Image (tube, rainbow, N blue to C red):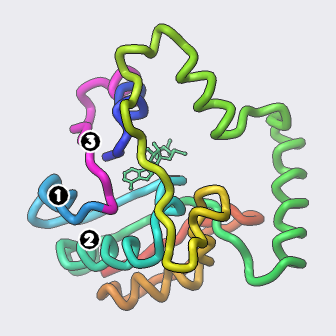
Amino acid sequence: MDADPLLLGLARAHYGPTAAWVQADLADPSWIEALPETVHAAVSSTALHWMSRASLAELYRTLGARTAPGGVFADADHMPLADDRLNALADAVGAGRAERAGTTGREEWGAWWEAALADERLAPLRATARPLPEADSDGRAEHHHGSNLLTAAEHAELLRAAGYRSAGTLWQAGDDHLVVAVR
Ligand SMILES: C[S@@+](CC[C@H](N)C(=O)[O-])C[C@H]1O[C@@H](n2cnc3c(N)ncnc32)[C@H](O)[C@@H]1O
């Protein structure tokens, strides 16, 4: 599920009919219509930081209500740490990992997106209106390059409030986190 037809088109081209590809805006409550009656596992990667805290809390409640007891939710994303000193150390950890993996010259999301839009071969898939980061009432998401700046602990808090019995960080390296919740 993604709001952007171009990203969905790329996924469909690579993975074909191994999955159902659904275009939906996760900040619009009608996305629930694409969900099965009972969810056993839900996974997201590097997408939910775009959502405002209020929309994310709503999404977790919607998903939690449909998730079977023992069902899981997993979210892999960049999440800030508790303060500037820890964030500086997380940056250093990220830079070290990129160097060891040989991925230092890698395109960032913005540059990748501009190149994709400029590629004529992708013209049929080009989004007419891709989703913009939502702003909280204090404008946080808007003013921080599309991140709601929620920490892993805040995600876990929202997930527990949405009815998940266990929620926490299962894996972390620098600011890369895997937050997991069990209903
Ligand atoms: C960095 S990409 C990650 C794509 C994919 N999840 C992956 O891991 O390769 C972020 C994605 O989040 C999607 N996105 C952002 N806000 C969204 C929303 N409100 N509803 C649905 N998709 C959204 C964007 O369209 C974009 O495809």
Residue type (three-letter) at the residue carrying disc 1: Leu
In the rendering, which numbered label is found on residue 160? none
Q: Is mark 3 on a helix, strand or loop?
A: loop
Whether 152 is drawn above or below 43: the answer is below
- First in sequence: mark 2 vs mark 3: 3
Dot 3 crowding, Cα within 10 Å, few <14, some 14–19, many 20+: some
The residue type indicated by label 2 comes to: Leu
Q: Mark 3 is on which residue type?
A: Gln
| Residue on which disc 3 sits | 23
Residue at (22% x, 80% y) in the render: 69
> In the structure shown, which secondary structural element does the residue marked by tag 2 occupy?
helix
Give, as a single range, the part of the protein colored magenta.
11-27
To which residue does mark 1 refer? 35
Looking at the rendered image, the disc whose residue lies closer to the viewer, 1 or 3, is 3
Horizontal side, residue 168 vs residue 125: left or right: right
For residue 63, the mark is: 2
Which circle's residue, 1 or 3, is located before the other in the chain?
Answer: 3
